Image (cartoon, rainbow, N blue to C red):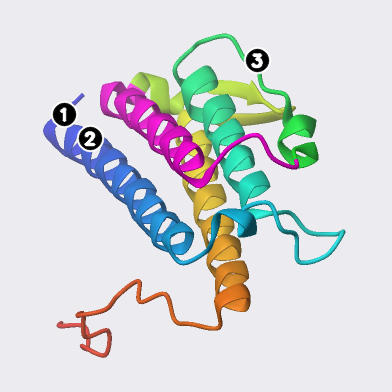
Amino acid sequence: MNNIEDDLVSEFLKNSSYRLDEGTRMIKISLDSISESDIWKKPNESSNSIGNQIAHICGNMTQYIIASLGERDDYRNRDEEFSMTGGFTKSQLIQKLEDTVKEAKIILKQCNKKQLIKIREVQGFKLSGIGIVIHAVEHYSYHTGQIAFWTKLMTNKDLGFFDGRDLNIKNEL
């Protein structure tokens, strides 16, 4: 691999890890804003609790990054992620999430160009390693938004994800 390719791979993986850290940060803020009893509440029967969302995020990240990209056996039980109605406290869910993200980031850090272009089958989809990383990061962000939205509905408060940052700064050319 030449230097530009090395730099691109490194930058892609570094930014993917950063996005995972940002999702974790936002989910932790959301969980800090709700009570223990709110973890397993559902907005309605067609939706999932925050506990279900975190179990699902961990299951998906384990299947896509840890098992597939990390070339390990896949033991995911997706249906269980949505059928759970308890069994984990807030602190246990946060620990499960942090442990899963940490393990996924270790695999990302070890990835090389060959692993990122290799085609694999995950959940019946044929994806390159890059496709797997994009899916996992996008999936995490999607559910982070759902958790934040449900938290805001329960608490009627802004979560302050970007407190202290001026988000109105214009891009420089």
The residue to which callout 1 is attached is 2
Asked if residue 160 lies in the magenta stretch, the reply is no
What percent of the width, then of the height, locates residue 158? Answer: 44, 81
The residue to which callout 2 is attached is 5
**Magenta extent:** 85-113
In the rendered structure, which amino acid carries the disc numbered 1? Answer: Asn
Residue at 42%, 60% in the rendered image: 32
- Secondary structure under the numbered disc 2 in the rendered image: helix
In the rendered structure, which amino acid carries the disc numbered 3? Answer: Tyr
Q: Quadrant of residue 12?
A: top left
The residue to which callout 3 is attached is 75
Asked if residue 109 lies in the magenta stretch, the reply is yes
Q: Quadrant of residue 94?
A: top left
Q: Is residue 118 visible?
A: no
- Secondary structure under the numbered disc 3 in the rendered image: loop
Residue at 30%, 39% in the rendered image: 13
Placement of 126 over or under 83, stated as above or below: above
- Residue located farthest toward the right when viewing the structure as drawn: 45
